[in-house]
Amino acid sequence: MKIFALGEGSYSVDATKKFIPFNPETDNYRERPASLFIHVNPFLIKTDTDLIVLDTGLGYKNKDGELIIHRHIRKAGFQPEDVTLVLMSHLHYDHSGGLVVEHNGKLVPSFPQAEHVIQKGEWEFGMSGKSSSYHKEIFEALVNRVNINFVDGSGQLQNDIRYELSGGHCPFHQVFWLEKGSDKVFFGGDELPEPEQLIRKFIAKYDFDGRKAMQLREEYGKIAAEEGWTCLFYHTKSLSVGKVSYLDDHFKIDPA
């Protein structure tokens, strides 16, 4: 497997849940009061059978009007139309915005040839309009335009891809395990979003079930360490692809 990090940049988020680009080298934290600062990092994986996107970022464009995620895919040597699988951990806007792109005033699918794997309950909640963390118009733009595989619970997608309903960050959050021969890759979405969250234990207010999410992080970290899984960190500031080790009740993460 070949792994490509498709970094979309850093952003500040305040109570309005608007994502504003933030450059640590030129912008001042103090000018963004009461804001959470996050980093957005989708992934691309090339296997011998598929070209896979794991979560799609915010869907922001560069100065040339091109989706940032599309630009990174092209820089990796592929075309967006080559993507065969889109694996979604969940549908919060910072993970699902890149599912669509604005074209001539309308939203159209960003990966029209790909099978989109989404938890059924997550889709239904996102379409309900009950939370501002979801942008319903994104999902409506996919209906009858792409192949959506609505999975329910945990299971096997292919011989080498397993999905697991985890439900810590949001009720229908899922994680993915991809295994090809000796290559093992784990994508934990927002239940293992940063290496630092393995190093320190805490209950996050932004999680649906903070205690469960904390326990899942430790569980996934121990599995990764014991079985040699490579971990992909979606909200990392620096280390996006890492190997986990566990010794004397402490985690350590090194570049993969």
Image (cartoon, grey):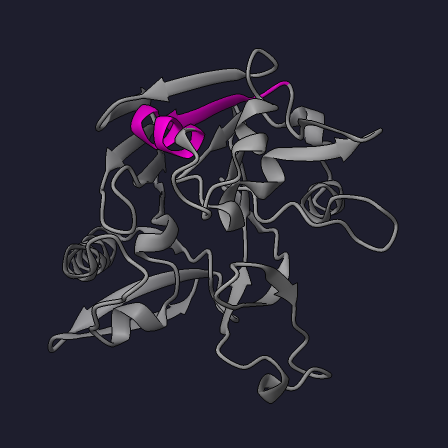
**Residue 207 pos. (x, y %):** 28, 57
Query: Please, is residue 220 above or below residue 118 in the view?
Result: below
Please tell me how many numbered marks the rendered image carries: 0
Would you say residue 159 is visible in this rendering?
no
Residue 210 pos. (x, y %): 20, 60
Specify the farthest residue to the left.
248
Query: Residue at horizontal 44%, vertical 28%?
Result: 127
Residue 202 in the magenta stretch? The answer is no
Compared to residue 253, the image places residue 210 above or below, namely above
Observer-nearest residue: 182 or 30?
30
Q: In what quadrant of the picture does the C terminus appear?
A: bottom left
Q: Nearer the viewer, residue 231 or 138?
A: 138
Would residue 123 be found to the left or right of residue 110 on screen? left
Relative to the observer, which residue lies in front, 205 or 219? 205
In the visual, does 22 lie left or right of 194? right
Q: Judge by depth and name the residue closer to the eye, 200 or 91.
A: 91
**Image-based side of 71 in relation to 178, left or right:** right
Which residue reaches farthest right?
Answer: 64
Residue range (magenta): 113-127
User: In which quarter of the view is residue 175 placed?
Assistant: top left
Residue 141 point in image, percent of width and height: 61, 24
Across and down, in percent, residue 59 comes to 65, 45
**Where 133 falls versus 23 (above or below)?**
above
In the image, farthest residue toward the top? 144
| Residue depicted at 34% across the width and 73% down the height | 196
The structure residue drawn at horizontal position 70% and vertical position 48%, both measured from the top left corner, is 72
Residue 127 visible to an observer of this rendering: yes
